[in-house]
Image: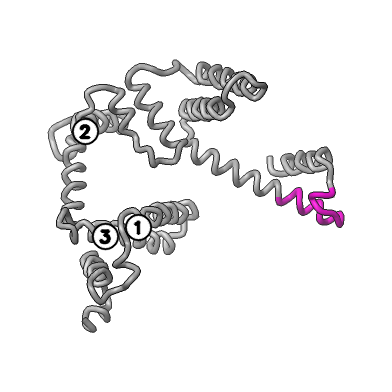
Amino acid sequence: MLDFVYKTKYGVYDLVRIVEILRSPGGCPWDIEQTHESTRRNLLEEAYEAAEAIDTGDRALLLEELGDVLAQVVFHAQIEREAGEFDLDDVANGVCMKFIERHPHVFGDIKVSGSGEVLENWDEIKRAQKGHGTHSEAISSVARSLPSLWRAEKIQQKARKAGFDWEDWRGAMDKLSEEIAELRAALEGGGNPGEELGDLLFSAVNVARFLKTDPEQALHDACDKFSVRFEYVEKCVLEEGKSMEDMSLSELDALWERAKAISD
């Protein structure tokens, strides 16, 4: 055990062994108690932290966070290994087979003109492998656990493959305006505001798709922009010896317009 613990360089299967030890009798009580369900959020959080490292361009942090994501994969595979279902090699086997099968232009004799055709082939192969005989089945297969903006985007992309889509952004914008009007009518007592708000957000994603803009990223950037402008407004208020609560909405709005002018 000591020789194992004090190695100078570890590999993937050292990680597998460490997780196995942690979950074995006499290992870590916390690790032994965990299930797929109890660590589901950990998997999501580690993936988002890796994404944060990519966003910041911090390579050292990315190295660490990718290790945390890998640890989650190994942990879930170990749970299934203990249950006699599959192990990490089976996980690797499955993804290797998928990569080979879905890249016939690399591992076969298929010719492609570019990345667009690669994606088309990938989708066709995926539909065949998943047994999706209809477009509805393909839409239903979109993971419900995805962030809602991404789920909406993927559903709309699959609907487009069936020919059910606007010709350009103008149709999407007209639909967005229609949904705004329906939400207003619902708020005035003519319907379900929550349902209409959902339709409005779904339509906004449609517009983002035509703009070739990631809706999740667009909203993320909007949150950052709001935060920076709000900080400026509060700084101005505090410099006057007041608090935000002391100011009228019109006064705050004037400062907000000043913040917009500075940041634009």
The local secondary structure at tag 3 comes to helix
User: If the image is split into quadrants, where does the N terminus sit?
Assistant: bottom left
Q: Which residue is mark 3?
A: 74
Q: Is residue 211 visible?
A: no
Q: Nearer the viewer, mark 1 or mark 2?
A: 2
Q: CA distance from mark 3 to mark 2?
A: 25 Å
Image spot of residue 116 (x, y percent): 32, 30
What residue range appears in magenta?
A: 231-246
Q: What is the three-letter code of the residue carrying label 1? A: Val
Q: CA distance from mark 1 to mark 2?
A: 26 Å
Q: What is the three-letter code of the residue carrying label 3? A: Val
Query: Could you say which quadrant of the image residue 83 lies in?
Result: bottom left
- Of the residues under marks 1 and 2, which one precedes in the sequence? 1
Outermost residue, left side: 109
Image spot of residue 14 (x, y percent): 23, 69
Image spot of residue 56 (x, y percent): 49, 55
Q: Which residue is mark 1?
A: 69
- Of the residues under marks 3 and 2, which one precedes in the sequence? 3
User: Most prominent secondary structure in the magenta stretch?
Assistant: helix
The local secondary structure at tag 1 comes to helix
Query: Could you say which quadrant of the image residue 2 lies in?
Result: bottom left
- Of the residues under marks 1 and 3, which one precedes in the sequence? 1
Q: CA distance from mark 1 to mark 3?
A: 9 Å
Along the viewing direction, whichever of 219 and 54 lies nearer the viewer: 219
Q: Which residue is mark 2?
A: 130
- Residue at point 17%, 54% (across, down): 86
Q: What is the three-letter code of the residue carrying label 2? A: Lys
Q: Is residue 92 left or right of residue 160?
A: left
Q: Is residue 166 left or right of residue 132?
A: right
Q: Is residue 235 magenta?
A: yes
Outermost residue, bottom side: 2
